[in-house]
Amino acid sequence: MSEKRKYKKRYCKYCEQKVDFIDYKDIASLKYSLSERFKIMPRRLTGNCKRHQDMVTIAIKRSRAAALIPYTVSRKVIAGASHEER
Ligand SMILES: [Zn+2]
């Protein structure tokens, strides 16, 4: 339980900061919603509201297309796995 401290807050971080637009170049903001393997964190962990989660998702996808963040960490790391989780 305790190692999830970063995400214990249930309110939306972006609402708190009155963010109206999430820039895909703002990696620091996006990283909050990314796991260490650069997967998008689910809303139940970040506490983001639906509106901001959607914005984050779009920003992350743009950011990936612009090669600012990787899609996923190299699949070679999980070479033992025969299937992919999506
Ligand atoms: Zn919000």
Image (spheres, grey):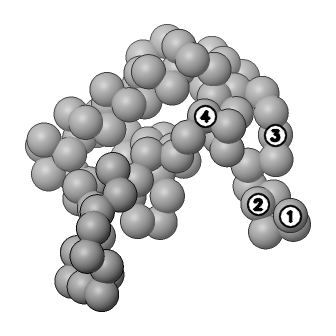
Secondary element at tag 1 = loop
Q: Earlier in the sequence, mark 1 or mark 3?
A: 1
- Looking at the image, do the residues carrying marks 1 and 2 touch, with CB atoms under 8 Å apart? yes
Residue picked out by circle 2: 4
Q: Dividing the picture into quarters, in which one does residue 6 lie? A: bottom right
- The quadrant of the image that shows the N terminus is bottom right
Q: Residue 10, how many percent across, how many down?
A: 80, 33
Secondary element at tag 2 = helix
Question: Compared to 46, does 2 lie above or below?
Answer: below
Q: Residue at x 67, y 44 (%)?
A: 45
Q: Residue 72, how many percent across, how many down?
A: 28, 62
Mark number, residue 9: 3
In this rendering, does residue 68 appear at all? yes
Residue picked out by circle 1: 1
Q: Is mark 4 within 8 Å of ligand 1?
A: no
Q: Dividing the picture into quarters, in which one does residue 12 lie? A: top right
Q: Amino acid at mark 3?
A: Lys
Q: Nearer the viewer, mark 1 or mark 3?
A: 1
Q: What separation in Å lies between label 2 and label 3 (alpha carbons)?
A: 10 Å
Q: What separation in Å lies between label 3 and label 4 (alpha carbons)?
A: 12 Å
Q: Amino acid at mark 4?
A: Arg
Q: Is mark 2 within 8 Å of ligand 1?
A: no
Q: Earlier in the sequence, mark 3 or mark 4?
A: 3
Instruction: Name the side, left or right, on which 47 lies relative to 40.
Output: right
Q: Amino acid at mark 2?
A: Lys
In this rendering, does residue 28 appear at all? no
Q: Residue at x 68, y 37 (%)?
A: 44
